[in-house]
Amino acid sequence: MKNIFNQLHAEEIINRIDNLNSSSKPQWGKMDVAKMLAHCSSFQDIAMGNAFPSRGWLGILIGKFAKPIFYNDKPLARNMSTIPTILILDEKEFETEKEKLKQKILTFQHNGPQKCTNHPHPFFGKLTSEQWGKGIYKHLDHHLKQFGV
């Protein structure tokens, strides 16, 4: 399983982000490309310890049992529900969101596992830094595939 803490894997993701453009269309889902980038950036904030969404009751009940979905090598399902706090509803500017996400990925990768959040994931609960690294890669890969890159 690829891990965003691995420099080559982070570079691969950055290169794929660079292959997006403002007219990139989703193969599934409702977000446009700028909203998708903002969504991924908001998710990155959680992993970096810059945002602390609370755990919902469903996550508390079944999150630990579903946790491997986040970091195993099976692709994420299309049209999965998302964490309400990172659901992007307002319009976003593509270039701004693209650069913001790239910077966050580079910072996260550079800071390494030791600076990963200890705060629980809002659905899956407590994760190790390795699980976060794999999950961040998997989440980004999922959304980049959504837009054909």
Image: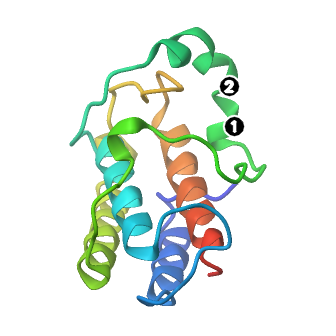
What is the x, y in percent for residue 92? 27, 71
Residue displayed at 33% across by 68% down? 101
The answer to whether the residues at label 2 and label 1 have Cβ atoms under 8 Å apart is yes
Please tell me whether residue 22 is drawn above or below residue 36 in the rendered image. below
Q: Residues within 10 Å of mark 1 (few under 14, many from 20)?
A: some
Quarter that holds the N terminus: bottom right
Quarter that holds the C terminus: bottom right
Residue 113 falls left or right of residue 134: left
Q: Residues within 10 Å of mark 2 (few under 14, many from 20)?
A: few
Residue 51 falls left or right of residue 86: left
Residue displayed at 50% across by 59% down? 4
Kindly report the distance in space between the C-alpha atoms of the residues bearing marks 2 and 1.
6 Å
Residue sitting nearer the eye, 116 or 29: 29
- Residue receiving disc 1: 69
Hey, which quadrant is residue 3 in on the image?
bottom right
Picture colour scheme: rainbow
> What amino acid type is highlighted by mark number 1?
Ile
Hey, which quadrant is residue 137 in on the image?
bottom right
Please tell me whether residue 22 is drawn above or below residue 107 in the rendered image. below
Residue sitting nearer the eye, 94 or 45: 94
Please tell me whether residue 63 is drawn above or below residue 107 in the rendered image. above
- Residue receiving disc 2: 66
Residue displayed at 57% across by 81% down? 25
